[in-house]
Image (cartoon, rainbow, N blue to C red):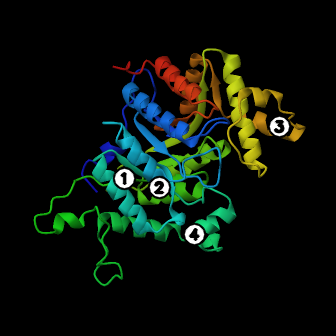
Amino acid sequence: MSADAAEEIRGTAHGTAPVPLSVLDLVTVGAGRTASDALRTGVELVRLAEARGFHRYWVAEHHSMPGVASSSPAVILAHLAAHTDRIRLGSGGVMLPNHAPLVIAEQFGTLEAMAPGRIDLGLGRAPGTDGATAAALRRTDRLNEGADDFPQQLAELTRFLDDDFPDGHPYARIHAVPGPVQATSPGGVQSPHRPPIWLLGSSGFSARLAGVLGLPFAFAHHFSAQNTVPALDLYRETFRPSEVLDEPYALIGVSALAAEDEKEARRQVLAAALNMVRLRTGRPGLVPTPEEAEAYPFTPMEREFVDSWNANVVHGTPDEVRAGLDDLHKRTGADELMITANAHSGEVRLRSYALIADAYGLPAPA
């Protein structure tokens, strides 16, 4: 790990934002749109984020969901790296049990070579999909084994990234390339950077593990809000200084959508909530339009879910969203807020991030 590892992790707040602001992109696909449309929106969004001073831009791994085109984070990140110069890019996250650690080390070593000093490797232990799809990904039906083996998989991945398996280890002569082994070859020169590892979670398991290992931690507040404060408290209580960090650093993912008009913001988040209703009831699909959501005959149970879900989505006018994000920061003490804006339209998502940037007085685009 490079000497400036902590600097690659910690961000800088801009404007009046209380902490650094970042972006989580689920590469959502709306009804009537294509995956190509969603990926083009991603390019526009990462450029906007870079121009406006957002600190990092992460892509999440999901599978078998028609409305989420982010099954291959490394491929998407390579595409985004070609369209940016400064913003940090990373996975939020790669689901480690779905992959061989060596493959991840090779993929993110390649990304690091493409965008030196700008790559984050966020790791989760959930499958990012349903059990049947996870079994197909892993070519096994013993799914609990993958989650239980997460600390061992993490240790293996870390050794591949650092190229430091001990003598006598079965993998001692195996090297992740691009990687540190290139510096030890005759005439070799290697980048001083190595993608910092983040642990992601929605419960206490990864919070405790990140604390014990002294790693940065990202919590999925956007879909597990009731666990946010307990998980962050556990992370801070168990934190041990490491070569990576001398004190805890935690970001939280938060759903937020701003529009010029409060009513329009409510229309947009209703459509995103309907998409979640369908996903949670085994009917995943494309993100519906606001018009479809307004006409949808919600059952009392579905309406209760929607109300509960949207209670944790910060939405409204730019001033209302800024106030909501400020309050969330005060309640959680998060060191960084990573905003995900889920909506049917890419234009609505882009506009939301621009309005939030304006509300905080982030740098104006060149």
Q: Which element type, helix, strand or loop, lies under badge 1?
A: loop
Q: Residue furthest left?
A: 187
- 351 shown above or below 65: above
CB-based contact (under 8 Å), mark 4 and mark 2 = no
Q: Residue furthest top?
A: 261
Which quadrant of the figure contains the N terminus? bottom left
| Label located before the other in sequence (4 or 3) | 4
Distance in Å between CA atoms under marks 4 and 1: 25 Å
Whether residue 248 appears in this view of the structure is: no
| Label located before the other in sequence (4 or 1) | 4
| Residue marked by disc 2 | 211
Q: Which element type, helix, strand or loop, lies under badge 2?
A: helix
| Residue marked by disc 3 | 304
| Residue marked by disc 4 | 138
Q: Amino acid at mark 4?
A: Arg
Q: Which element type, helix, strand or loop, lies under badge 4?
A: helix
| Residue marked by disc 1 | 196
